[in-house]
Amino acid sequence: MENLRKSKNIKLIAEPKELIRNCKRRYEVKENLLDFKEGWSKVIANLKEPKTFSTIGERTKFTIYCTDGKIMFQSPYKGCKISESEMKKVYERFIEKRSWKTNDYTDITVHASYFLRLLKEYFVK
């Protein structure tokens, strides 16, 4: 690092520790959440008609709606049912980790980006 600072051709815009700290802040979650039952009821009530959202990474649009107490989503690539128990697992992990990063949920679901969008839309107070 000292060699980089002495070089006249390289100008550091920030110390490496500062860059890491800024990256971590990007994913900090400060929002208060509804309890699970209240949030799930809100999801069910609001998705009687299909709605379109972007995934948490804003890369893919998907349509989501409720049928028979299950949430259905359809994207250009795939479709899936989301049950209450699956959503609860993601919710509990979210409470534990406070993270919007999909990598923190890969052991629970491959559809974390969709689940996290629902959390952000319906569970954040």
Image: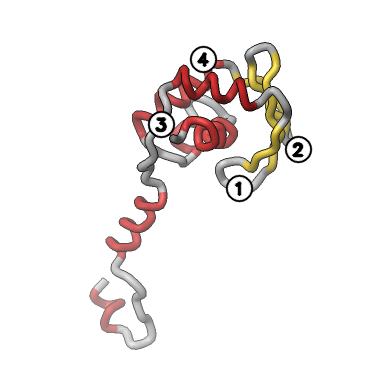
Q: Residue furthest top?
A: 68
Q: CA distance from mark 2 to mark 3?
A: 30 Å
**Precedes in sequence: disc 1 or disc 2:** 1
The residue tagged with tag 2: helix, strand or loop?
loop
Q: Nearer the viewer, mark 3 or mark 4?
A: 3
Q: Give whichever of 123, 15 is nearer the camera.
A: 123
Return the residue at label 4: 85
Q: CA distance from mark 3 to mark 4?
A: 18 Å
Which residue sits at x=28%, y=61%? 17
Q: Is residue 98 toward the left or the right of residue 123 in the image?
A: left
Residue 105 in the image: state x and y as whole percent: 47, 31
Return the residue at label 2: 76
Return the residue at label 1: 58
Q: Residues within 10 Å of mark 4 (few under 14, many from 20)?
A: few
**Precedes in sequence: disc 2 or disc 3:** 3
Return the residue at label 3: 33
The C terminus is located in which quarter? top left
Q: Amino acid at mark 4?
A: Ser
Count the numbered circles shown: 4
Q: CA distance from mark 1 to mark 4?
A: 25 Å
Q: Nearer the viewer, mark 1 or mark 2?
A: 1
Cβ atoms under marks 3 and 1 closer than 8 Å: no
**Precedes in sequence: disc 3 or disc 1:** 3
Q: Give whichever of 8, 53 is nearer the camera.
A: 53
Q: Quadrant of residue 7?
A: bottom left
Q: Amino acid at mark 3?
A: Leu
Q: Quadrant of residue 82?
A: top right
Q: Quadrant of residue 23?
A: bottom left
